[in-house]
Amino acid sequence: MTTIKHSEIENTIELEKARLEIENRDQGGLKVYLVSLECLDDDPESIQESLQELGALVRTVGDDCVGVTVQKKQKPIPSTYIGQGKAEEIEQSCAALVVDYVVFDQELSPTQVRNLEKIMKRPVLDRTGIILQIFRKNARSKEARTQVEIARLEYLAPRLSNAWITWERQRGGGGSGGKLRGAGETQIEMDRRKIKDKIASLKKELEKIEVERETQRKNRGDEWNVALVGYTNAGKTSLMNELTDSTLASKDALFETLDSSIRRLKGSQNMNILMTDTVGFIRNLPHGLVASFRSTLEEVSRADLILHVVDVSHPCYKDHIAVTEEVMKQVGASQVPSIFIFNKADLLPESKLSKILMRVYPGCLCISSKNIQDIHKCKDTIVEFLSKNMIEKKFNVPFENKALLSSIYAHTRVLSSEWTQEGGEFFVRMTKGVWHKYFEHHDHNCV
């Protein structure tokens, strides 16, 4: 049996404690070293853009980026993601720069984190870990805090046991090893059970919140719903404030808005139009966060119109559009009518960009949320779209026509419903496109 020094056990546990302290802290001011891996199939420009975005995420937490390394390899190393030699070089740089922790731009496995921390002698986080810190910091409502905590615990669960696994392997089995091994195994099981129970409890709380949200949604059945979506820091909240005369917190920072906010559109020509602001998206958004925020994002899938807000001044705005559209697809909102709002046009030099965008994205608007005339134009566009593209129908649905009933709930907004001995009577609202695609051949069921 290989004997492991007691100091290595202590170092492993100290690293575990240090990492958890970083993830649970309230303040910034720490020094961070950024690392990324560029494989053969990767686009170097995309790697650099993603690294710049990672730096912005770290600064949003309040920490300082003091160094960066990009290693080029054919593919990731299973045990350490980057080469061990490169990891040792980074450790030397971190020691010279007095770095507090290292952040990788890609998602790491628990084993890779453990091995890298052993080499670098300091906590190692990945992109997901940093995003979770920002989400915890900015979540204000009970719903957002619950969603973030579920994602955080699911992310930490396999990582919390690192120290115990290492300790267990180091202690081995001779002498009184049976008792020692049993103690280690019991601790791991206890940690996992506690986390599992906590996640289950939080998911039950979230289900209750979703029921309340559904009740609120039904009470708003006679109103139009317009949702703002887009990449983080695209200016959605600023636009929301101008359209609704609100004072929601708006900063030039990533993920400033996590809580969905609903406000009434001003100057909407007596139409009851509600605006919904949503969480911003980002490339490589952790799947756990998308899943946790699915209930909130379902507001978007049930909207009458989506305003896809884009920071047109950003050099990678096309990539941002692709990321947002992919998330919209994941939450079932890809079929909802949408209008592109190319924001921050005031930051661009005079050009023919607006005409080019109009050709590529028909019906889009190129605006600045700081320009009152652009805000009026945006309001007029919303009202005109809803007035021209939405229709209301009343259906009589026999009990045996389950296909029509399913389509009504899936593709329309039910404004009211009433059940009789023959079936159900539904008064619904939908776009003209939905009518022609799903219901035109059911015209005989309309009253």
Image: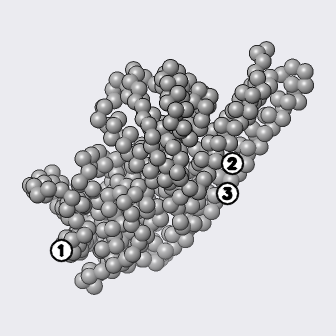
Q: Residue 91 occupies which quadrant of the picture?
A: top right
Q: Which mark is residue 195?
A: 2
Question: Relative to 190, is 422 on the left or the right?
Answer: left
CB within 8 Å, label 2 to label 3: no
Question: Relative to 378, is 408 on the left or the right?
Answer: right
Q: Is residue 436 visible?
A: no
The one nearer the camera, 428 or 249, is 249
> Which quarter of the rendered picture does the C terminus lie within?
bottom left
**Residue pointed to by mark 3:** 201
CB within 8 Å, label 1 to label 3: no
Residue at coordinates 81% horizontally, 38% vertically from top-left?
A: 186
The location of residue 348, given as percent across then percent down, is 18, 56
**Nearer the viewer's eye, disc 1 or disc 3?**
1
**Nearer the viewer's eye, disc 2 or disc 3?**
2
- Up the image or down, 214 lies above or below 199; here it is below
**Residue pointed to by mark 1:** 373
CB within 8 Å, label 1 to label 2: no
Hey, what amino acid is under mark 3?
A: Ser
Q: CA distance from mark 1 to mark 2?
A: 52 Å
The location of residue 318, given as percent across then percent down, is 25, 47
Give the structural element (helix, strand or loop) at label 1.
Answer: helix
Give the structural element (helix, strand or loop) at label 2.
Answer: helix
Q: Residue 174 occupies which quadrant of the picture?
A: top right
Mark 3: give few (<14), some (14-19) or many (20+) Cα within 10 Å. Answer: few
